[in-house]
Amino acid sequence: MTDNNGAGAKQVSSPSKKKGMGFALSALIVGLGLIITKCSGLLRDIIVSMRFSEDLFRDGFTLAFTIPDLFYNLLVGGAIYSTVAPYMSAQLAVGKEKQGVRTVSIFISVVCVVMLVCCAFGSIFSEPIYALYALNNDKIDPQVLSLAAQASKMLFPQIFFIMLAALCNGILNSYRKFTITSFGPVLYNILVLVVIYIFAGNSLTKLVMTTGGILVSAVIYFVFQYSLGFKQMKQFRFIFKPADKEFLMLFRRAIPILISASITQINVVVLNHFALMFDQGSVYGFRNASTIWQIPYSVFVVAITTVMTPELAGDYESKKYSKASDLVSSSMKSALFMTIPSAVFIAVLNLDVVKAIYQWTSAYTDRNAQTAATFLLGFCSAIITATVIHVFNQAFYAIGQTKLPLAAGILGLVINPVACQIMVSLGVGPLSLSLAYSFTNVCQMIMLAVAYCRRKELAPHGIIGFLLKSAVCAVVMAGVVYVVDMFVPAQGGKFIQLAIIATKGIVAVVVFFAMAVILRMKEATYWIERFKRLFKKRSSVKG
């Protein structure tokens, strides 16, 4: 980072006190960026199925990301946003920007040095690391592991630059620069799409060339993100002082978050281990299902909490507990208002959704679609439970309480593999993996909800009534969509198929929203008022 002593000394007022975007508009902008990012991510999976037309290379390519991603989460992962953004936001809220800049500079410097060493280690020893997948399991195809190990040699250094870009995002979000951080990932995904389309193919050479191109994409992504936020980022510089008291305080706060984020990725590794036990193509099918269920989760929930976290940190630091409680309540309800109908729609039309998204050529067979749809069905409840978990986790991080999310993560780490093993041994088949994941989420959700609501001054309110009304809306919506699907199945050419699915989606939204209005849910009336105001403004402009 460039040296700029005292660059933040003149800025002592909180960004929240300045004129700027409201919470809803900020969340909308972040959500728009996430929608584009997720759509480009889906397109990436589609191109992977076209260019890696054999299941062996699809599985190898997918598996290659799991260990580098685990390294990333072990070292920085969720701590980037969930530690840096709340800490910097709190410092800005109380007029201590200069101190915050120095501490975050030390944090960045230390994690960069550690990450460089670990990336080098991963690239050199990728073969023995991936061989661990096959321990005590002779059902796993060694060819898949060999391909994944070779491809990952380029992905270990790639995570270093992803980390740098994420650090930029965490810092810029603390300054409420949500527009800047929302569209950088879109550039990265576009570059990755181009790389896969040009280089991917059914050979080891093409596989390694593809991951090499992804490494270059990550470098460009970081440079782009840093240049857009240069005004804020130039304050931060290289300061390697791991014994600094403020850094140690921040680091102690980050450790539970690091472990929690690592546990999430460890569970992904565990689930892929079990997926390797099934037919070839199961790893890629599991990836397809994971990508689909995380679309509503990422677009709605992450968008809302991205804006909520720095705001909540500032409110808590300023002891505005009533405002903090209202913020968590509205964030939770807004997120669930979007994810509950999404989960129900996907559950009713799981196979049609998979085929609509991924089946563009004969390379993606009906068997591939059925495998992914089976996984997806088990994930549907996770869309809702993961929403609650993420909101509570970010709320805990915002108030500096990181041990409870860690405890919930450890609980999940214990339950997930045990549940997988039990269900697989009972002959549940591939569905056992996503069901085990969903069951694990339920246990974590209950633990976090009970723990957070003990702080009555911060606890969200009105959630039970909201859930009961949402359940009524969801049941009616599910019935209507099921009946419509019986009479109008998704058949015909690709674009007709897409049009039918889109029409059913519109019907689902209209029914859910109409029921919400009938039940007088504030989340529905809020958007009606927003559209009325927008319409009035346009009418007045025309007049």
Image (tube, rainbow, N blue to C red):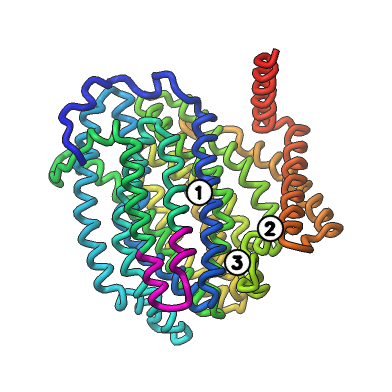
Tell me where the magenta segment starts and ends, as one range: 193-212
- Residue 375, label in figure: 3
- Residue 347, label in figure: 2
Q: Residue at x 59, y 73 (%)?
A: 430
Q: Secondary structure at mark 3?
A: helix
- Residue 425, label in figure: none
Q: Judge depth for marks 3 and 1 and give the one in front.
A: 1
Give the quarter of the image for residue 81: top left
Mark 1 lies on residue: 37
Residue type, label 1: Thr
Q: Among all residues in the image, which is located at the extreme front? A: 198
**Alpha-carbon distance for marks 2 and 1?**
23 Å
- Residue 494, percent from left and from top: 71, 61
Q: Are marks 3 and 2 in contact (CB under 8 Å)?
A: no
Q: Residue at x 40, y 27 (%)?
A: 315
Q: Is residue 156 above or below residue 458?
A: below
- Residue 411, percent from left and from top: 43, 59
Q: Secondary structure at mark 2?
A: helix
Q: Residues within 10 Å of mark 1 (few under 14, many from 20)?
A: many
